[in-house]
Image (spheres, helix red, strand yellow):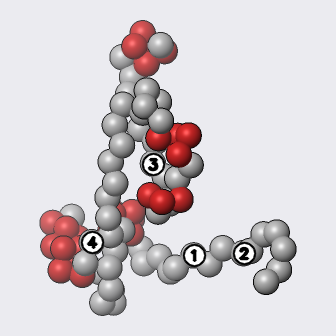
Amino acid sequence: MLADFLLLQIICTINYRTADIDHALLRPGLLMCHLVFERLNLIEAARLAASLGGNLPGARDYSLAEIFSGEQCDVLIRPHTGFAE
């Protein structure tokens, strides 16, 4: 309702795998649009980075966030919670 009155669009990004998103957030009527951007392979990522005036280190796949930030991000290792295995 506030978005209609102020003519605002709210964009929310989630840096999770699609399978990890709670299904309650994806129920009909909650989101106007749900887009998934997969990681780009090295060739696609290098082409996008070059068009933005940058270059990419290494030879792997990249997320859009890594390309637009211009910084290389390492894989995040999340600590386990709950019972130890």
Q: Is residue 69 above or below residue 60?
A: above
Which of the 4 image quadrants contains residue 82? bottom right
Q: Which residue is mark 2?
A: 79
Q: Which residue is mark 3?
A: 13
Mark 4 and mark 2 in contact? Answer it, CB < 8 Å: no
Separation of residues labelled 4 and 2 (CA atoms): 26 Å
Residue at the location (27% across, 72% down)?
40
Disc 4 residue type? Leu
x and y, in percent, of residue 52 in the image: 21, 64
Secondary element at tag 4? loop
Q: Residues within 10 Å of mark 4 (few under 14, many from 20)?
A: some
Q: Is residue 37 above or below residue 67?
A: above
Say whether disc 1 or disc 3 marks the residue closer to the N-terminus.
Answer: 3
Q: State whether residue 11 appears in this view.
A: yes
Q: Nearer the viewer, mark 1 or mark 2?
A: 2
Separation of residues labelled 1 and 4 (CA atoms): 18 Å
x and y, in percent, of residue 32 in the image: 36, 31
Residue at the location (53% across, 59% down)?
20
x and y, in percent, of residue 19 in the image: 48, 60
Say whether disc 2 or disc 3 marks the residue closer to the N-terminus.
Answer: 3
Separation of residues labelled 2 and 3 (CA atoms): 22 Å
Secondary element at tag 3? loop
Q: Which residue is mark 4?
A: 40
Q: Is residue 37 above or below residue 22?
A: below
Q: Which residue is mark 1?
A: 76
Which of the 4 image quadrants contains residue 49? bottom left
Left or right of 73 in this view: 77: right
Say whether disc 4 or disc 3 marks the residue closer to the N-terminus.
Answer: 3
